[in-house]
Image: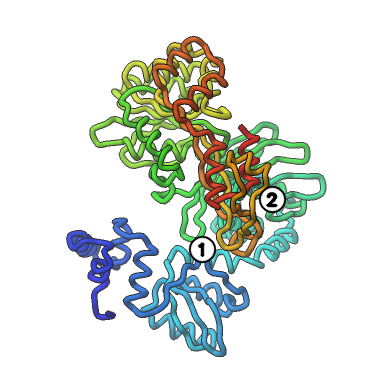
């Protein structure tokens, strides 16, 4: 089996065709020196896990999923960090004088020999993906370093430097070794490795608290001396292009940082508080990995069919609603990826442009320069568009222009902040859009939330109580699961989030109801009669499937 070319092995596994193999080989020949594996992954014919598993089988070595493996710090540290990064490897376990090492390059005999000398052990290689090894290295070697970096930064008293000094250092290559710089970089890296979506840097009288949002909840990352606050905030302001001398008014900026091979787009918001400036950083991963397909949004098959039907209508407006951080933009981008075709002119107007999508014309709002949503929309309508995406309907003028664009033959996608699908209609009317215009243009409304997913490694089974049965709308007790906490989920009991949806479709009856100015509860009642599954129905289904907990059902139920 070892002698069979990897491409042929992939064909035998049914992962690629002979034609696809020839395409990969042709592209590899053109790329002058690129490895077969790098080329096939770039072409997205197989996933990184699929390729690594096949390669491991071909080499007759085990494959390990490092994202799920429990690593032992003392074993990991047998290999120095610089060596681990040099050979993209990490130690898994040690038995006697035999060390098992996970690597993405198991055929590298130079690495094996170096590791044998450095560790004093014989080396057994296991196969792992390059990305998983990078993430594991970042997570394991950063543990314990943060305290020393904080201590070093405190001793240096960076806060005593003038703003001019800090600004000058920011443009100096040697700044990378400064303690406050390493601290800022470490905060971002540690937050990303813990799957955080936001970082909060909060000043208080005697200390500065760093909190991160993971799975929708804020958890404490670290507490710093208040003496470090000014220097830390100044560092983030410099990197994100803010005015470091201005402390009286809020500011917004943008920066980037590479963590474990992933390029992060960081949105920085600054707000003056009583004891200093509070900074909130939104973490966004860039690249193709962050643009999902509709089928990856977590919709039920029923909701997927309803949403897909909305996107097939050539003109009208489709709205996605939900609170901040509920994944509205992700849903819109997925929808654009579904409907954008080479024969269509797709234009977006966003503030900011969160994900750059090839083949789509994306317009960035700049209010200081007079490029507002309504001004951009007026110009877009003169650009011969087929499909328009409006990042957010923030005011009456933007909403009215978007609705008029939908009525005049364009497909418009946008977001709006409401609690559920039915109240979106009344919100538009309250904003000043005529009810008949809403009724005429509306195709459908998607309301969504994010609910936490139970950790599969530690969730605990129990029987439901009568009050819980009533909440789920079922007759008798069933098996449900509750969170426990383990190393795989950072002792939270949950690992990741999934979206739940409520999709209201416009029908002739619904249009009549909207035109005569019906209230939200009337609209919701008719939508339910016409097959709309409410948010609580969807999260109830997830509880019954063992994917989430009763706590999440109660949270979502009382939120809508």
Proximity of marks 1 and 2: CB atoms separated by less than 8 Å: no
Task: State the quadrant of the N terminus.
Answer: bottom left
Mark 1 or 2, nearer chain start: 1
Above or below residue 302? Residue 483 is below
Secondary structure beneath dot 2 equals strand
The image shows residue 252 at horizontal and vertical percentages of 58, 36
Residue that extends furthest to the right in the rendered view of this protein: 206
- Identify the residue at horizontal 48%, vertical 12% (top origin): 435
| Residue 298 image position (x, y, % from top left) | 46, 45
Judging depth in this view, the residue of 2 and 233 nearest the camera is: 2
Relative horizontal placement of residue 36, taking residue 196 as reference (left or right):
left
List the single residue furthest toward the front. Answer: 476
Residue at which label 1 appears: 135
- Judging depth in this view, the residue of 340 and 370 nearest the camera is 340
Number of other residues with Cα within 10 Å of mark 2, as a class: few under 14, some 14 to 19, many 20 or more: many
* Disc 1 versus disc 2: nearer the observer: 1
**Label annotation for residue 210:** 2
> Residue at the spot x=36%, y=79% of the render?
107
Q: Residues within 10 Å of mark 1 (few under 14, many from 20)?
A: some
Please name whichever residue, 257 or 414, is drawn nearer the observer in this view of the structure. 414
Residue beneath the point at 44% across and 38% down = 331
Residue 15's spot in the image, x, y percent? 28, 62
């Amino acid at each position: 089996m070892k002698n069979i070319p990897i491409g042929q092995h992939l064909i035998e596994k049914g992962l690629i065709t002979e034609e696809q193999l020839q395409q990969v080989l042709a592209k590899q020949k053109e790329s002058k020196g690129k490895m077969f594996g790098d080329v096939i992954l770039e072409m997205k014919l197989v996933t990184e896990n699929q390729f690594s598993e096949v390669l491991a089988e071909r080499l007759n070595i085990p494959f390990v999923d490092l994202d799920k493996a429990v690593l032992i710090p003392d074993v990991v540290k047998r290999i120095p960090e610089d060596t681990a990064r040099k050979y993209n490897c990490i130690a898994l376990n040690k038995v006697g004088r035999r060390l098992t090492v996970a690597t993405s390059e198991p055929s590298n005999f130079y690495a094996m020999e170096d590791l044998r000398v450095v560790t004093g052990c014989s080396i057994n290689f296991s196969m792992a993906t390059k990305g998983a090894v990078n993430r594991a290295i970042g997570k394991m070697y950063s543990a314990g370093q943060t305290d020393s970096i904080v201590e070093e930064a405190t001793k240096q008293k960076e806060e005593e430097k003038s703003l001019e000094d800090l600004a000058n250092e920011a443009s100096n290559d040697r700044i990378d070794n400064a303690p406050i710089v390493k601290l800022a970089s470490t905060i971002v890296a540690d937050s990303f490795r813990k799957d955080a979506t936001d970082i909060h840097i909060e000043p208080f009288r005697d200390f500065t608290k760093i909190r991160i949002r993971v799975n929708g909840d804020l958890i404490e990352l670290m507490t710093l001396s208040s003496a470090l606050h000014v220097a830390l905030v100044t560092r983030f302001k410099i990197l994100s292009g803010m005015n470091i001398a201005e402390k009286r008014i809020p500011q917004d900026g943008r920066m980037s940082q590479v963590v474990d091979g992933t390029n992060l787009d960081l949105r920085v918001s600054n707000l003056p508080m009583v004891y200093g400036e509070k900074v909130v950083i939104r973490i966004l991963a860039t690249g193709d990995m962050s643009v999902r397909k509709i089928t990856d949004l977590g919709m039920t098959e029923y909701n997927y069919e309803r949403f897909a039907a909305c996107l097939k209508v050539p003109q009208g407006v489709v709205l996605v609603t939900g609170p901040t951080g509920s994944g509205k933009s992700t849903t819109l981008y997925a929808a654009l990826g579904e409907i954008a075709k080479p024969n269509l002119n797709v234009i977006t107007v966003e503030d900011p442009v969160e994900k750059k999508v090839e083949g789509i014309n994306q317009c960035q709002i700049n209010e200081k320069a007079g490029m507002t949503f309504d001004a951009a929309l007026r110009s877009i309508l003169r650009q011969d568009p087929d499909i328009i995406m409006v990042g957010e309907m923030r005011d009456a003028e933007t909403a009215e222009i978007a609705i008029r664009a939908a009525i005049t033959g364009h497909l418009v996608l946008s977001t709006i902040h409401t609690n559920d699908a039915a109240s979106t209609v009344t919100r538009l009317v309250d904003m000043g859009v005529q009810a008949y215009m809403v009724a005429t243009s509306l195709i459908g409304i998607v309301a969504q939330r994010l609910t936490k997913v139970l950790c599969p490694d530690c969730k605990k089974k129990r029987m439901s109580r009568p009050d819980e049965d009533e909440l789920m709308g079922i007759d008798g007790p069933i098996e449900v699961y509750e969170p426990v906490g383990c190393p795989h989920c950072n002792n939270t009991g949950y690992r990741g989030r999934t979206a739940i949806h409520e999709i209201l479709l416009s029908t002739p009856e619904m249009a009549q109801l909207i035109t005569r100015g019906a209230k939200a509860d009337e609209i919701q009642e008719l939508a339910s009669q016409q097959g709309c599954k409410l948010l609580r129905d969807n999260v109830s289904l997830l509880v019954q499937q063992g994917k989430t907990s009763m706590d999440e059902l109660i949270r979502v139920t009382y939120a809508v």
